[in-house]
Amino acid sequence: MKFYISLLILLFDFTLLSANNFFEPAQKVKLCAPSVPIITCDPYLSIWSPYDKLTEGNTEHWTGKEHPIIGAVRVDGIVYRFMGKDRKNLKPILPMTYTEHWEASYTTEQPAGNWTDVNYDDAEWKKGEAAFATRRMPRLRTTWNTGDIWIRRTFDAESDILAKELFVMYSHDDLFQLYLNGEKLVETDYYWANDMMLKLEDNAKEKLQTGKNVLAAHCHNRAGDGYVDFGLFYKDKYACNFEKEAIQQSLDVLPTQTFYTFTCGPVELKLVFTAPLLLDDLDLVSTPVNYISYQVKSLDKKKHDVQIYFEITPELAVHEPSQFIMAERIEKNDMLYLKTGTIDQPYTKRTGDGVRIDWGYVYLASGKESNKSLCMGDYYFMKEDFIKRGKFGSTMFKEDIPPNMYEHMTALSYIENFGTIGNESKSGFLMLGYDDVYSIEYFYKRRLAYWKHDGEVDIFQAFERAGKNYNVVMQRCKDFDKQMMADALKAGGSEYAELCALAYRQAIAAHKIIKDDEGNILFLSKENHSNGCINTVDISYPSSPLFLIYNTELMKGMLTPIFYYSESGRWTKPYPAHDLGTYPVANGQLYGGDMPVEESGNMILLATAISLIDNNAEYARKHWEMLTLWVNYLAEKGLDPENQLSTDDFAGRLAHNTNLSIKAIMAIAGYAKMAGMLGMDNVAQKYAGMAGKMAIEWEKMADNADHYRLAFDKPDTWSQKYNLVWDKIFDMNVFPSIVIEKEIPFYLAKQNKYGLPLDVRKNYTKSDWVMWSACLAPTLEEFNQFVTLLYKYADETPSRIPLSDWHDTETARHMNFKARSVVGAYFMKLLEMKIKERQGGAIK
């Protein structure tokens, strides 16, 4: 009997794994993502592919800096690259400051004559060493504090230079031009970038001459920091690369998984990137480990010899490649690891927006099996081994890893040898993860990530658990993706569902989970690409629908630090702080301007939403003193706000802001709701009556015939009144129904090619707010008239970045902002549906 039971269990497990095909997406997706999520966990482990095809270029950190993952398959001795692009083996003719502080002539006064010509007399110019930059910029040697700088770097060239494949590299901040012997090579727009590369075409190379030459540059610093560094390089003929590309057949982006299919000669490869961000499982969400799964099978029914190769570099663990690194190979408990990170390990020291982590360690990990190998070695020699033999040879590093990546790049590589494959597919997986050691500095104390449970769990245990639970987690992710897509389809249609799928990982991975000294969960956002603030209240506010649906504990984790900041006496103003500092240091607000009505309304409305969804107001009770302070501020200042910033601060200050007034009124009504839930009937009646009277007054003050104004004192203007959404989804009935009845038709008449502008002032919009405004529509058909244009924007934007929430409605170009958590706002329509489906007082 025991034999039969064991056999049945074995058959059940086999059937379960066979039936649950992890390499087929739960749903096919048509949307062409502007950037595809590859590895997503938190603001530092966040890797994307900004291409339609995975072979077009290297994967990037959300900031735009390359975080390359290379992948290739060897079929019968022929190698097909399916992921990333090999780096060119460039040797310096004129090195950049990573290896040499080069000298040049420079001036900060407009030069006369043709200053880019090789024979120009620059004897009166100053001499200085690069980098030329404002204070606090990297590798600064010559301080430049004026608006403009002109630089001439002369050099002698040998007669054989034209036979070489040449490249210029440059870093600049802001507008930059670069010339070779008078020939313009580069002219940028207003932005900053590092290590840009340009191949010299024949017409440019013809300007070179034996003997004296000059690279001349001009940089105009419009605002903030300024920076110039540039050099000339040639491609070394000896470089073993994966030149042949696999043919990409499909790409599908679902909430937790990204699916690719490739043809590699006679073999099909399926590739799945899984970020197990299941919000009901905080251990899983916070553990910084993603899966890379792969499956190969013969397409011609013949047998083929197949190996697969993956590779990362220490670039994933540095802010900039000039930082010195270490690396090692580890065997532990039947697992293999490759580990790399900086030598210095400056825990939580580097703050800011467009920065990457330079402490902690990135890992590649796999089970210890006879057909799997993980090794470190020279960037090109490792590829040569794979190309020639399909396995690692004697070129691997065992110790004395070269620390300088500019002089010698190390590859951390993985190979699985499938041996012979035929009609049956073969599959495997490896794991990529990051141990940041310390995640956040929270009120002057460094904190461990939540998954470490106060140091009881280490990264090796995390990898072991992830490997052991692979099948279960993959099935859970597939089941979640299927259910979420079905729910979103039901709530808003197919285009809406695909937008939610794209937004899901982006919204979650802009956060980090830690605990405070009392054991409270803290869910701290980074305000990506808008100033780098940590725990910004008006970032939590738009992102809230996603977390209100799937785990209100995370929503509380966004509010708790702001409550603590005021309750501790560290923040003493009668309204909430804007933020807690600059990521990853949360020691107190650093943002230059307060948002009194904005943040008061946000905190009260989010506390209200938590209370209504949890069907109890106990969380609000804990913080009732602060909520009361803030609601009384709104009672006094909220109806007709003074000249101040709101969440749309990029548009500037605005007095008498009608949409901000709506937020204040809805927050007062929300406070009344919570008071009623807590048995404070008199308080509830007082504030509910107050909100109702204010709403009636608002309608009179803002009325502009067929719509409502941008500001009370600005007739014939308009704006999106997205803050009304709470009135609709919670059936609070605060505002007269005529408000929404007039606004929606007006909005539909104002839409441009790529959506509804934010207001009358500009053509740009915020897609998070458009989605909330769309939820005011009385029918699904009208809702989709808004969503279709947002879908069109996401599908057609030329801005190849993690989805920007701020774009031009005429061109689909992003204005600024990328990779921000505010796209969690897209889930508002799904939240509305879930509220309607409530059973027993809890979201279904």
Image (spheres, helix red, strand yellow):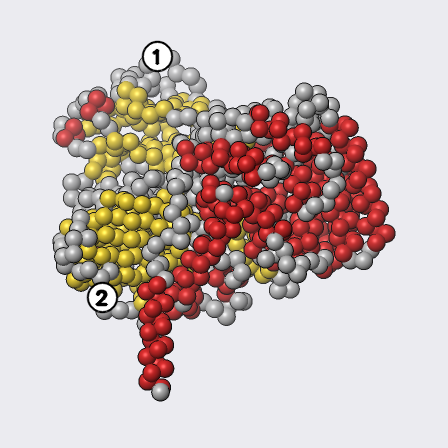
Q: Position of residue 57 (x, y in %)?
A: 30, 41
Residue appearing at x 38%, y 65% in the figure: 471
- Using the image, tell me which numbered label, if any, was put on residue 113: 1
Q: Position of residue 696 (x, y in %)?
A: 79, 34
Q: Relative to 584, is 396 above or below?
A: below
The single residue placed furthest to the bottom in the displayed view is: 1
Figure quadrant of residue 66: top left
The type of residue carrying mark 1 is Gly
Q: Position of residue 453 (x, y in %)?
A: 53, 67
**Residue at mark 2 to residue at mark 1: CA–CA distance:** 67 Å
Residue appearing at x 63%, y 55% in the figure: 838
Query: Which quadrant of the figure contains the C terminus?
Result: bottom right
- Residue designated by label 2: 371
Q: Relative to 196, is 292 above or below?
A: below
Residue appearing at x 63%, y 51% in the figure: 835
Pointers 2 and 1 in contact (C-beta within 8 Å): no
Q: Nearer the viewer, residue 796 or 638?
A: 796
- Using the image, tell me which numbered label, if any, was put on residue 732: none
The type of residue carrying mark 2 is Asn
Residue appearing at x 31%, y 19% in the figure: 116
Tell me, yes or no, if residue 187 can be seen here.
Answer: yes
Tell me, yes or no, if residue 393 can be seen here.
Answer: no
Figure quadrant of residue 171: top left
Q: Relative to 722, is 351 above or below?
A: below
